[in-house]
Image: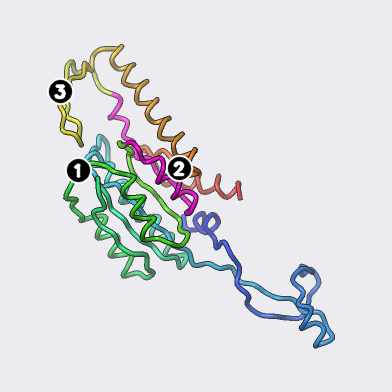
Amino acid sequence: MSGEYHAVFKGRGMNFSEVREYQIGDDVRTIDWNVSARTGRPHVKLFEEERELVVMLLCDVSSSSLFGSGRALKMEVAAELAAVLAFSAIKNNDKVGLLLFTDHVEKYVAPRKGRSHILRILRELITFEPKRSGTNVAAALEYMLHVQKKRAIVFLLSDFIDEKYDRPLRVCARKHDMLALHLLDPREFVWPDAGLVKLHDAESGRPMWIDTSSREGKRTLLIEHKRWQDGVKQTMQRSGADYLPVTVTEDYVRSLIAMFKRREQRR
């Protein structure tokens, strides 16, 4: 996947490299007139792509990310995704940082390069145990804006069971290149016929009864879930952030590559 990563997130600027004699096919706009006049022969300036980028991984580690009905929990898929992105970035000689959050920032690892740094990030993703359970996306974005002054590529991985993060999201998307990866598990909104089931909200702890055998109840749950997911998508799009739904039971790498290709076509 590193090829797709490089194509989409290649350097945004060019640095001067050297001057050489003009060759047929060179862009005449790059002619160095001072050197050409001094030598009596046309010369052009050569530039190198400014490759070094900063990638920030913002991962939701709240209690709702511990849900999983298939091969993995949402938190485990988020960790896998973050690892894939981190390795793609480091292969392209970019810096990578990590921010783990619940309803406050649990852990911040400043962006750096190198294999040992990536291994540290992987350890944090695999072994970190959060102290709190809720979700506050706004707090994570505001913290990131405070510590990351230069433009960065920001991957925000969450199930977005939260509200009121619109404003910091807009600010962040204006300053940085934002991509929101929305982690979804189909079992959260598709239930078997099991009659009345008592559930507890993963973050508030409040009990609730759901009639999983009621066709109307199931239909209502599906409609409400679709409305909620569409709302998250619209919030991201209004802010200027790219949005990708990631169903944890499906091949997320294929979805990620497809999104990278769409972004490349827009360039």
Which label sits in the foreground, 1 or 3?
A: 1
- Spot occupied by residue 256 in the image (x, y as percentages of width and height): 45, 46
Above or below, 41 against 228 in this view is: below
Give the secondary structure at mark 3. strand
- Which of the labelled discs sits on residue 255, or is there none? 2
Q: Does the magenta stretch include residue 169?
A: yes
Give neighbour class at mark 2: few <14, some 14-19, many 20+ (Cα, 10 Å): some
**Left or right, 231 with reference to 42:** left
Q: Name the residue under label 1.
A: 133
Q: Nearer the viewer, residue 114 or 3?
A: 114
Seen as rendered, the residue at the extreme right is 40
Residue 210 against residue 90 in the figure, above or below: above
Q: Which of marks 2 and 1 is in front?
A: 1
Nearer-N-terminus badge (2/1): 1
User: Looking at the image, which is closer to me, 179 or 85?
Assistant: 179
Q: Which of marks 3 and 2 is nearer the N terminus?
A: 3
Residue drawn 25% across and 37% down? 68
Where residue 57 sits: x, y (%)? Answer: 36, 54
Residue at 47% of width from left, 58% of height from top? 2
**Colour scheme used in the picture?**
rainbow
Local packing at callout 1 (Cα closer than 10 Å; few below 14, some 14-19, many 20+) is: some
Q: Is residue 167 above or below residue 25?
A: above
Q: Marks 3/2: CA distance?
A: 34 Å
Which residue has dot 3 on it?
198
For marks 1 and 3, the one nearer the N-term is 1
Left or right: 54 in relation to 183: right
Q: What residue type is labelled 1?
A: Ser
Highlighted magenta segment, given as a residue range:
163-190
